[in-house]
Each structure stands twice: as structure tokens, then as C-alpha cells.
Image (cartoon, rainbow, N blue to C red):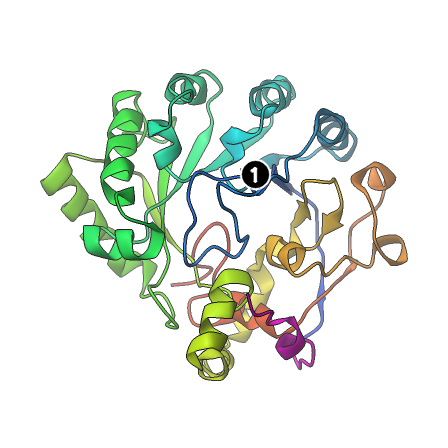
Amino acid sequence: MKDTLEYLRETDFPILRRSRLETLQVNLGYLCNQQCLHCHVDASPRRTEIMDRGNIDSIIKFIQKQKIKTLDLTGGAPEMNPHFRYLVTSARELNVRIIDRCNLTILEQEGYEWLPDFFVENSIEVVASMPCYLQENVDRQRGSGVFDDSIKGLKKLNAAGYGKSESLKLDLVFNPQGPNLPPSQNELEPAYKKELLDKYGIEFNQLLTITNMPIKRFGSTLLSKGEFEGYMQLLKQSYKHENLASVMCRTLLSVDWRGFVYDCDFNQMLELRSDFNNGKVHLDDLMTFDFHNQDIVVMDHCYGCTAGQGSSCGGALID
């Protein structure tokens, strides 16, 4: 796989500084039951990196010390971490909002039948990958049969009460098929809702559009096809200064499966360590650290979050 890091280092992206830390985004490991083309984590069934119990306990302690409001769980498939249930129930005891970034097909995996009920019991917000409402597009991007299993997973979540009110929130994620910016989130959402309801009887709360980052598997594909330079030009030409105020890295901290800290999930995948304490730093060393006004490590991939309507793990920044 070709690495795009050397093409991203030289940048004129504006200086960014952190505001109040509110969200801890934790990568519980790269193990996944899928292997998607757009995955910036390069997750797959072959990966063995998994967060252990010691680092899980550090997450819980950090939440307490820093008074974190939101715990955002990702992977891989975060539910495949053997300590997933322990982390979720411990965080809920601290009255923390929990987001689970679910690939939907995990709900069809043998041994994970308990997930919908567990989600309900712990009031977990589910953010589910659904890059298109057309079968051929989803299977092309995420693998054969993924669309059908995703529909089955969505029906299970609906049956458990998800997507029908704000109390059990189910959001879907759209990713473009190739080197393009996402369309308007507000305009695409009604089409998603109509298509999924009319054809499959599926309901959900909100559609989140997320720009594909020119790193890892997607970045390597761009390089192989000779599309990397053109995509970067598109991101830079579409830059909007007003997106800087609400990019996710200003209120979020990213933690990898080993417990090391980064400014965002994308920097984590590029191993761009934060400047806290001048280099590689573990969560254990930041329990009482003041994150306010700290510099954020930026490179050219940051244009992906500020192009067009903007992009974050919570969808578009403006529309």
C-alpha cells in the first residue's frame, strides 16, 4: 500500500488551536469483519491490534479526571473488542454520552446478537456506515453482500426502537464513491429517507456526509490511479475559512488502541503525534493536563475537513 504522508507534510494550512475538550474518541482496535475501500484506518478481519483492559481503565479514569462529556467509540469494529461492554457500562455510570460507530454488518455476525438490546440498555447513539442507498454502490465500496446485511442490521435497530425518536438515535454516514466532495447533506438526506423507507421500511434520524481523507487505503488508491494530485487540488480550491471554527479537532482528542494521544482520528492514522509534552504521549500522562489553547498538528489532509460544507465525524460543518 502506497503511503501519502510524504505528499502531505509541506502545507500552508492555517494554524489551529484547541478550545475546550469535550469529546474523547477512542479507537478500540483495527480488527473488523469488513474491509472497505474508503477506510482510512485500513481495518480488516486480518488485523490483530486491540486495546487491552489496562488502557480501557485509563480511558475511564481520564473521563473522570477531565470531565469528558462524550465518548466516541470507533475501530475497526469497536464491538469486536472483548472489553467493549465493560467500557460502555463503566462510562454510562459516569453519565457520559456514548457514540458507537457501527458498520451494521456486525449485527449479522455470529456471537453479536446481543448488540441491539445492549445499545438500548445503555442509551448508545449509533452512527452507522451506509455510503449509499443503492446496493451496487455499497457492495462496490464495502464488499459483496454488505448492502443486504446492512439492511438487515438497520431493521434490527428499528425493531429495537432506534431511528424513531431522539431518545434512541440512529444516524447514517455517507461517503463519496471516489475523489469527489460529498453533496449537500441537507439535500441528500430526504432522498436517503424516502428510498430506505419506501423500499425497506427503514427509519433513521439524520444523514451525516463525510469527506474521504487522502490517507491510508483511500489515499493509496488515489496514488495508484494517478488521482491524488487532482483530489488535493479539489480540496484546496474548495477550502472555506468559516469551517475552521467548528472542525472537530478543536474539542476532540483521539486515542489509539495502545493509549497514545493524537489531535484527531486522521492524525492518528498518519501517526502525527500531538505536541503535548513534546512528543509521543500516553493518556496516563495527561490526566490533569490543560488542553485549552494547545496547538493542533496540521498538514495538507486537513483541507479535507474544511472543503465545501466541511466534514467531521458529526457530518457537515455548514450547509
Q: What residue occupies the far left of the structure in this picture?
A: 198
Q: Quadrant of residue 298?
A: bottom right
In the structure shown, which secondary structural element does the residue marked by tag 1 occupy? Answer: strand
Q: Quadrant of residue 119?
A: top left
Q: Is residue 10 magenta?
A: yes
Amino acid type indicated by mark 1 = Asp
Residue at image location 20% in from the left, 35% down from the top:
202
For residue 79, side relative to residue 70 (left or right): left
Q: What residue occupies the far front of the structure in this picture?
A: 46
Residue at image location 30% in from the left, 23% down from the top:
161
Q: Nearer the viewer, residue 116 or 168?
A: 116
User: How far across and how far down the image is residue 18, in percent?
Assistant: 72, 57
* 7, above or below 264, in the image: below
Residue 227 visible in rendering = yes
Q: Which residue is mark 1?
A: 72
User: How far across and how far down the image is residue 283, in percent?
Assistant: 79, 40
For residue 169, side relative to residue 159 (left or right): right
Residue 134 visible in rendering = no
- Which region shows up in magenta? 1-12
Residue at image location 27% in from the left, 48% down from the top:
144
Dominant SS type (magenta): loop
User: How far across and how far down the image is residue 25, in percent?
Assistant: 61, 42
Q: Quadrant of the N terminus?
A: bottom right
